[in-house]
Image (spheres, rainbow, N blue to C red):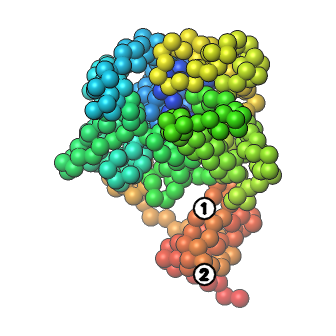
Amino acid sequence: MIKLEDHLHGAGPKRILSLDGGGIRGVLTLGFLERLEDMLAKENNDPDFRLCDYFDLIGGTSTGSIIATGLAIGMKASEIKHKYFELGSKIFGHKTGFFQYLFKGVKYDNKPLELALKSYFGDIQLGDKEKIRTGLCIFSKRAETFSTWAIHNHPEGKFYEQNKSWPLWQVVMASAAAPTYFLPMFMKDSSGEQGAFIDGGISMVNNPSFRLFLLASLNSYPFRWKLGKRNMLLVSLGTGNSDNKSSFETYQKNNLMEWAAKMPDFFMYDANLANQMIMQILGDSPTSITIDSEMGNLRDDLFLGFHALTYLRYNVTFGKDEMESLGVKLSPQQLETIGEMDNPKNLTTLSEIGEKAGQHYIQEEHFKGFMQVHTEPTHGEYFVSGSQYDLPFESYTKKDIPIGACRIDNDFEIMTMEGLMKAKKGDYLIKGVKGEYYACDAEVFKETYAKTKE
């Protein structure tokens, strides 16, 4: 079994899975995941294949956080789907009374969801390095500070020590506590500070793909994985989009309450599209979509001048044409209600859509170069830079190898065969004997190299 530390520190390429929020529509995402699981299991000749062995980081928001956490502890997509069917009607089946909704502002009691999450994840804590088998990131919004939190399990993270004892069920509850649906989740860190956490979808990370890319690549975070379309794969799965097309006459007649009801849809649609746009200009995307009629699909635009990753996005729109193309027959009434986030009557239909969309859209050629699961290290020991080891080190001197060097007076970046290297002002650009370029820290350069005599 591949360990957490192998996912975080092992050799690349690195694979990231991003899961959208969307309430009960998460069962559609699970159809995509079943297809992905089956495809990779066959490729790796492993009938007991688990996505936690393939992906090095799995992240999700709201319902996506439930699925992400289940996958990260080794559950199969089919197991998680079974639980959605089992508990969907219990969580969303009974609304609170009118007066409780009026005074507390929530449609549903938190207790059924809380009990379900406790039964799934038990006493597993965020810092459990054995039971959480890969990188995990859960997105939530801290209401009183308006800040979006990326709560992850990397042991070198800035807030890991103070958050590592949080129970997983509690962190997931914090991500899924959608305002007007559930009460906020109140959590304390090890310092005793308490925060009110609500659904991470009330932010720009209902589709968390871009934030997961930043988490994996920025120096501010501990992952710091190499960029490059062969070095990083990010797979992003949606929960379905409503078909928002309507006539202008519809909006001529809207009253205040109807406008208010539409606002969340407007925000979520734009947030999702913004993430899609950013990821398509950063990466090589075989699944790219048309952003709008002027921008197109952005395949000819490279924001960084190179492909920072391979990016795959799979989703559906609940429109008549697309549903028919998938072989799913929906009545006009079903098309109106299939996008509801809290309607357990839609579970069977959403499951069918996810399964058929997975078979139709997820193609093996999209994963070229990324099909094989990481193998366990063949060595019996694991070393981390910066650590001390009681080993019989002997002294050696490097052989003289001529290089070219130039001090650069600005921050700079170099695209190497292994990915993007970043360097600061005053560091040296090195040209090797084979014409390769790399960076060297200024202090290290002064201690290591001496200028040759002409």
Q: In which quarter of the image is residue 408?
A: bottom right
Corner quadrant of residue 267: top right
Report the amino acid beneath label 2: Asp
11 w.r.t. 393: above or below: above
Q: Which residue is drawn at 60% across and 61% down?
A: 421
* Residue 409: mark: 2
Q: Is residue 386 above or below residue 254?
A: below
Secondary structure under tag 1 reads: strand
Q: Quarter of the image for the C terminus: give it.
A: bottom right
Q: Is mark 2 on a helix, strand or loop?
A: loop
Write down the residue under mark 1.
Answer: 421
Question: Which residue is pictured at 28% across the width and 25% down the height?
Answer: 99
* Of residues 230 and 379, the one drawn nearer to the viewer in this rendering: 230
Q: Mark 2: few, some, or many residues within 10 Å (few <14, many ≥20)?
A: few
Nearest the viewer among 70 and 270 is 270
Is residue 47 at all visible to an observer of this figure?
Answer: no
**Amino acid beneath label 1:** Met
